[in-house]
Image: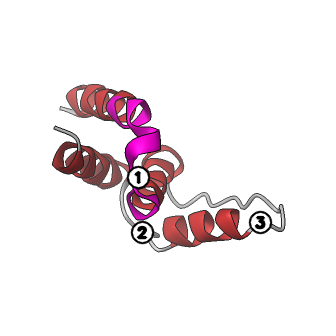
Amino acid sequence: MVNDLNIQFQEAYKKASDYEEKLPPDVMLKLYAYYKQAVKGDKFTFNENNNLRNAFKFNAWVQLKGMSEDEAKKEYINLVNSIIK
């Protein structure tokens, strides 16, 4: 089951990457947060550039604190499948 989830996650990532320029910023932010949580879990790191965009991305990720990596993968897959047919 986990291997199947990983395959679905990678497929969703590729699909989202192909549509990256066509997705609205709020969707991209959600995808970023789910991806980071799925890959790194609660091991938060912040790009210290004084960049408002990085602050928004970090904040979106931190809001998922405590979500399991598998749950984040499922949410990522669901989001991608709901917006990209």
Q: Amino acid at mark 2?
A: Gly
What is the magenta segment's predominant secondary structure?
helix
Q: In the image, is 85 to the left or to the right of 41?
A: left
Q: Which residues are magenta?
A: 15-27
Picture quadrant where residue 43 is located: bottom right
Q: Which residue is mark 1?
A: 31
Q: Amino acid at mark 3?
A: Asn
Q: Amino acid at mark 1?
A: Leu
Q: Is residue 48 above or below residue 63?
A: above
Q: Quadrant of the N terminus?
A: top left
Picture quadrant where residue 47 is located: bottom right
- The image shows residue 31 at horizontal and vertical percentages of 41, 52
Instruction: Report the front residue among 67 and 28.
Output: 28
Residue that appears at 32% across and 31% down: 15
Instruction: Report the front residue among 31 and 7.
Output: 31
Residue 66 bears which disc, if any? 2
User: Mark 1 vs mark 2: which is more N-terminal?
Assistant: 1
Residue that appears at 72% across and 61% down: 46
Q: Which secondary structure lies at badge 3? A: loop
